[in-house]
Each structure stands twice: as structure tokens, then as C-alpha cells.
Image (cartoon, rainbow, N blue to C red):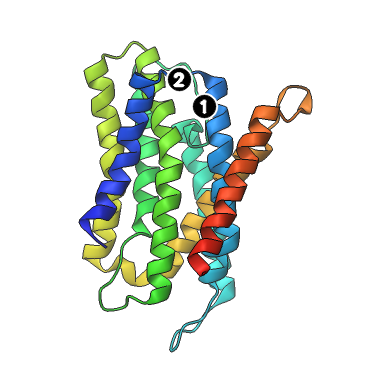
């Protein structure tokens, strides 16, 4: 784990702010297409790398499949609980917000970012090639996932009438939660349990990606734009895993 990891985590939020102010990309339909891309990319990385590696045994390490499955299930339902606080912004559901509601949503997103990043912590005494590969793909997943969240969050805060400086301060709080989660995990020894933390995050990713991909559209149609975004996200996810394996 290096300073670059922290900067990469922070950069996705900065890019989200640049997208809102520079490209004015706050239209709900465009954000949904972007979320479709990230949902497909996430599910590809989870199914092709993160999940299989979670069950891959290392020398001297005993794998308990039932326990790992339990943590994945736990992560899935933890995300359902967090949705009730964040109102589903993690999978592109924007809402009109006012006053205290904005801070409740922000709190839910901060908890979400912190929990996800706990699995990014690394223990210098227990680091293996397996751990480095998992860390790389999880870092990429979190960055890609947080980018559209930052767009939706900042857009909602500005549309609620919040001052630009206050909205950016809220976004900054969200931006530092993932680096803090990674730091806490590495410095407190939680990183030793990275396999179980990873299982929780995989459960979270499964809930988010499947919600994005399978949510109902008008008349149960799958828009062409969303289909293209899903195809590109899926293709890039597959290429990323294949390229890493070569």
C-alpha cells in the first residue's frame, strides 16, 4: 500500500466534481447510463477475479467456504440496510433532497465508503502475490464505483439549494472516508482478516451491481444506451482480468 493508492481513491471523487462543474453531467438519464457501465464492470471483476480468488487456498491457510459465504451474505444485507440511509445513491437513484435529509444521505454514503475500504488495508507481515492482486482489483472497483456516486451526490446537493462551498465540503468528507478506512484497516491489524473483509465487500458489490443491472425500466424495456454501456463495462472488466492474468 502506497501514497498512490490514497491519491487514486481521492481522485475519483475529484473527477466527479470536475464532471459536474466542467461537463454539467447531472442529468438523471446520463447518470443511469454511467451507472450501468460501472455495474457491469463491477460484476465482471467480482465474478472473474475477486470471488474466485477469495476461495483460492494459499500455503498454510485453511479455507472455510461456509464462513466466507456467510460473510458475503452479510455484506449483501448490510448494503440493503445502508440503502435505507443513503436512499440508494450507490446505484444511481437520485432524489430531491432538503435540509437534514442531505446530511442523512451523506452519513450513509460515508459509512458505505469506509466499510468498502477496510478490505483495502494490507498487513506487511502477511502480504502475498494473491493479496496484491486482490488489492489492485478492489482498488479499481472502488474507484470506478465511487465516480458516479460523487456525481449523483454533488448534483443532488447543488439542486437542493446548498451553497457550492458547502456542497464541495460534503463531497470532500465523502472523499476522505475511503482513505481513512484503508488506513484504519492497515494500522489496527484488521488487514489480517482481509479475506473476510473482502467477502463483505463482494456481498456489497453484488447487491449494488445487480440492482443497477436488473432494476425495472418503463414497460420493462432495456434502453439501447444502457445496453451499450453494460456491454462496454462487461468487455472492459473481462479484458482487465485477462490482461492481469497474462
Quadrant containing the N terminus in the rendered view: bottom left
Give the residue at mark 1: 31
Is residue 136 or residue 114 the one in the foreground?
Answer: 136
Q: Which quadrant of the figure has residue 134?
A: bottom left
Is residue 30 or residue 206 the one in the foreground?
Answer: 30
Q: Which quadrant of the figure has residue 158?
A: top left
Judge whether residue 53 can be spotted in this image. yes
Residue 69 location in percent, x, y?
58, 66
| Residue 176 in the figure: left or right of residue 23 | left
Judge whether residue 76 can be spotted in this image. no
**How many C-alpha atoms fall within 10 Å of the one at disc 2: few (<14), some, or many (≥20)?**
many
At horizontal 65% and vertical 28% (from top left) the residue drawn is: 225
At horizontal 33% and vertical 72% (from top left) the residue drawn is: 192
Q: Which quadrant of the figure has residue 197?
A: bottom left
Give the residue at mark 2: 26
* Contact between labelled residues 1 and 2, with CB atoms less than 8 Å apart: yes
Residue at the extreme top: 161
Q: Is residue 98 above or below residue 90?
A: above
Amino acid at each position: 500500500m502506497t501514497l498512490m493508492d490514497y491519491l487514486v481513491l481521492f481522485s475519483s471523487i475529484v473527477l466527479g466534481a470536475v464532471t459536474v462543474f466542467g461537463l454539467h453531467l447531472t442529468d438523471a438519464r446520463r447518470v443511469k447510463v454511467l451507472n450501468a457501465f460501472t455495474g457491469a464492470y463491477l460484476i465482471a471483476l467480482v465474478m472473474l477475479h475477486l470471488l474466485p480468488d477469495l476461495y483460492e487456498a494459499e500455503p498454510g491457510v485453511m479455507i472455510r467456504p461456509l464462513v466466507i459465504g456467510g460473510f458475503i451474505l452479510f455484506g449483501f444485507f448490510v448494503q440493503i440496510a445502508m440503502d435505507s440511509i443513503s436512499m440508494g445513491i450507490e446505484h444511481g437513484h437520485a432524489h430531491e433532497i432538503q435540509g437534514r435529509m442531505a446530511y442523512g444521505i451523506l452519513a450513509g454514503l460515508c459509512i458505505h465508503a469506509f466499510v468498502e475500504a477496510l478490505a483495502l488495508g494490507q498487513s506487511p507481515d502477511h502480504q502475498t502475490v494473491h493479496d496484491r492482486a486482490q488489492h489492485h482489483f478492489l482498488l479499481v472497483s472502488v474507484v470506478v464505483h465511487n465516480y458516479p456516486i460523487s456525481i449523483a451526490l454533488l448534483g443532488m446537493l447543488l439542486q437542493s439549494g446548498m451553497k457550492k462551498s458547502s456542497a464541495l465540503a460534503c463531497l470532500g468528507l465523502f472523499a476522505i472516508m475511503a482513505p481513512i478506512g484503508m488506513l484504519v484497516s492497515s494500522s489496527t491489524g484488521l488487514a489480517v482478516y482481509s479475506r473476510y473483509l473482502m467477502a463483505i465487500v463482494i456481498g456489497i458489490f453484488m447487491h449494488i451491481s445487480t440492482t443497477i443491472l436488473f432494476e425495472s425500466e418503463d414497460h420493462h424495456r432495456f434502453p439501447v444506451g444502457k445496453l451499450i454501456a453494460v456491454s462496454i463495462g462487461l468487455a472492459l472488466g473481462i479484458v482487465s482480468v485477462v490482461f492481469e492474468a497474462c
